[in-house]
Image (tube, rainbow, N blue to C red):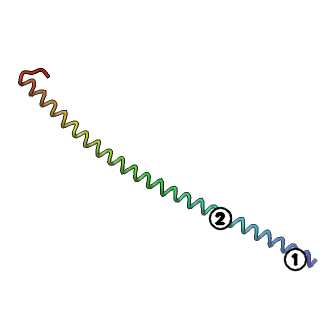
Amino acid sequence: MDAGTTLLGSLLACVGVLGAAVVAYLGKRGENALNGYSSLTEKLQSERDRLERQIAERDTRIDELHSMHAADQSEIARLRLDIHRLGGAP
């Protein structure tokens, strides 16, 4: 019975060590997955910020062009009135 108890104890110890190794392996995989997710999140946030800046710059440029267009249209209307006043055909 003494050899059987020792064998049983050894088997249980091996199972415990293997179980601990599996838990450590799975824990490390989870940690790596979490680090990868965090890195991906940071990349996505920086890309989003960059795109938001580009959109703001584009919107500013559109506003400038709209103002220029309105000024051009008023100048064209003024010149047409001058042409008409001077007797020409627009």
Count neighbours of disc 1 (C-alpha within 10 A) and say few if under 14, some if 14 to 19, many if 20 or more: few
The residue indicated by pointer 1 is: 6
Q: Residue 83: give x, y in percent of width and height.
A: 10, 25
In-image side of 36 versus 84 (left or right): right
Q: Which structural element holds mark 1?
A: helix
On residue 46, the disc is none
In this picture, is 70 found above or below 54? above
Q: Residue 55: give x, y in percent of width and height.
A: 36, 46
Q: Which structural element holds mark 2?
A: helix
Residue at point 29% right, 42% down?
62
Amino acid carrying label 1: it is Thr
Of callouts 1 and 2, which one flags the residue occurring earlier in the amino acid sequence? 1
Report the residue that reaches farthest toward the right.
1
Please identify the quarter of the rendering in which residue 73 is found: top left
Count neighbours of disc 2 (C-alpha within 10 A) and say few if under 14, some if 14 to 19, many if 20 or more: few
In-image side of 53 versus 67 (left or right): right
Residue at point 16% right, 34% down?
74
Amino acid carrying label 2: it is Gly
Report the residue that reaches farthest toward the bottom.
2
Q: Nearer the viewer, residue 7 or 89?
A: 89
Quadrant including the C terminus:
top left
The residue indicated by pointer 2 is: 27
Residue at point 25% right, 39% down?
66
Residue at point 21% right, 36% down?
70
Q: Mark 1 and mark 2: span between their CA atoms?
A: 31 Å
Please identify the quarter of the rendering in which residue 33 is found: bottom right
